[in-house]
Structure formats: structure tokens, C-alpha cells
Image (spheres, rainbow, N blue to C red):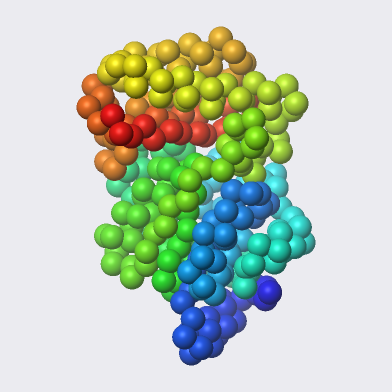
Amino acid sequence: MLISTKISEIREIIREERKKGKEIALVPTMGYLHEGHLALVKEAKKSGAFVVMSIFVNPLQFGPNEDFDRYPRNIERDARLAEEAGVNLIFNPGVEEMYPTTNLSTVAVGKLGDCLCGTSRPTHFNGVTTVVSKLFNIVQPDRAYFGQKDYQQYLIIKQVVKDLNFPIEIVPVPIVRESDGLALSSRNVYLSPEQRQEALVLQKSLKAADEWIRQGERSGSLIEEKIKEMIRGESSGEIDYVELRHPETLDRVEMIEDSVLIALAVRFGSTRLIDNKLVEGL
């Protein structure tokens, strides 16, 4: 496995792999790898492509008073896990390599970024789409892999690829969970044992909502309130949002007619966790 911190070197390596007839798969991450990231690699390797993993904690997607400085980083650990999973090349640039001068150009996302996580983190998705667009231009992959835990992010990236005519297939990979149901996240390491146990209410409430819908409940607002009641009743978590949204447009769903996305974000202490469930086949 190769590791590079330089854009010019990455481009040269990929150019040589293209000459060999290889397709290129990109797995973008911010590092501190877990089984969710490795599931993206596993999916990418199915095609026989040359797998590039980016590891870059992107400052543009962190707002004021967020956890950029304390976001977990361990490149030695990440490199070992990536190599074991079959990654061919890690791109691990510094901030100066990705943003050598004041970044005057950004990629804005429009209405898909104005709701859910975009409400409390208004600059977040512009930071995501800007860095991902840069990675697409640097790596020029045939396919890029994104986990559905960050469902809004996946949908936004898919729209950017369509709008900006990137010749890239965006491949979604289902949420990977711990054995007890907690969605895997690099931020889980921040949780105290008590918070970690309380956080299980997120998956529990999503499962309950799925059941309410399948039993015939169709009021979006009523389901949102019932989820909030469950979270408040079984944890000390501070709710950022609990919302039912259309899985393609992210429009609010007042009356459920077909597939619906249930999305939530809850803070346990200073740690903000997100989770979601896509309810289909109604």
C-alpha cells in the first residue's frame, strides 16, 4: 500500500494505474477508521478497482466552536487498518496542501443543505461539497463510496455530481452498526460509558417509528413527537432535530404516502450523533 501527502504524486500514481487498465475507486474519509469506513472499502474492492482512500480532516466543514481541533486522528492506526482492508493508496494531505492560499472558490449546495444538519451547521455542507469536489478533481475516480449514515451528505454529493457533470458513479453503502445497534461513528469515542448506553435510544426510537408507520400511522408530526418523547424519556440527550423527510428531495413529510426518511441528531454532552432510517415498501 502506498501513502502520499502530495497532489502531484497522487495524480502520477493514478495516471500509471490507468495505463494498466485499472478503474479507480475513491473512499473519502476524515480518518480514525472504523468498520463503517472499512465496509466502504469492501464494497469498492468488489469491482477490482484500484482503491484510493483519502484521509483528511477538512477544516471547511467545521463551524465555530465545533470539534475540529479535538477530532480524533491516528494515521498510523488508520494506515494499518486500511492496508488490512485492501486499500491500494492513501491520500493524506495536510491543510496547506489542500488549501495553500485563502480559498476563494467554494461549491454551494442549495436547498438540500438548508435543512436537517444544515440548520444548526449552516457552513458544513458547503465545506463538504468543496473538499469532495477537490478530491474528485485530484483523484478523478470512476466511482466514489459514501455511507448512508450521513444520508443528507450522500444525497447532496449525488446532486453535485449531477449538477457539475462529474463522470463519477456515487455508490451508497448501508449504515454499519455496533452489535447493540449504535451507528458507527468516529465521534463515538467521545462518549462516556453512561452516554454510550443512553445513545442506544436513537436506534431504538427509529425502529419504533418504523413499526408505527407499518401499523398504519401516517402523521409525520405525530411520529416526530413520539420519537422525541422516547429520547427524552430514556436519555439525557439534547435533541437537535427529529424530522421526517422525502428521501430524494428532503422536503418535509406531513402525511406519509410512500417511502420516508426518518432523520435525527442528538447531543450527548458535547458529542453530536446522527442516525436515520429509510422506511420503504409501504
Q: Nearer the viewer, residue 206 or 194?
A: 206
Query: Where does the N terminus fall, quadrant-wise?
Result: bottom right
Q: How many marks?
A: 0
Looking at the figure, which quarter contains the C terminus? Answer: top left
Residue 46 visible in the picture: yes
Who's the residue at 47% across and 16% down the image?
228
Q: Quadrant of residue 221?
A: top left
Q: Quadrant of residue 193?
A: top right
Give the camera-side residue of 63 and 227. Answer: 227
- Indicate whether 137 appears above or below 62: below
Residue 134 in sight in this render: no
- The image shows residue 188 at horizontal and vertical percentages of 66, 37
Residue 62 percent location from the top left of the image = 54, 46
Residue at the spot 57% in from the left edge and 21% down from the top edge: 201
User: Measured along the vertical axis of the image, is residue 185 above or below residue 17?
Assistant: above
Task: Identify whether 207 is placed above or below 56.
Answer: above
Q: At x 57% / y 78%, what residue is drawn?
A: 10
Compared across the picture, whether 18 is left or right of 235 comes to: left
Q: Position of residue 163 (x, y in %)?
A: 27, 60
| Left or right: 75, with 121 as reference point | right
- Residue 162, x across and y down, in percent: 28, 60
Which residue occupies the foreground of this view, 89 or 102?
Answer: 89
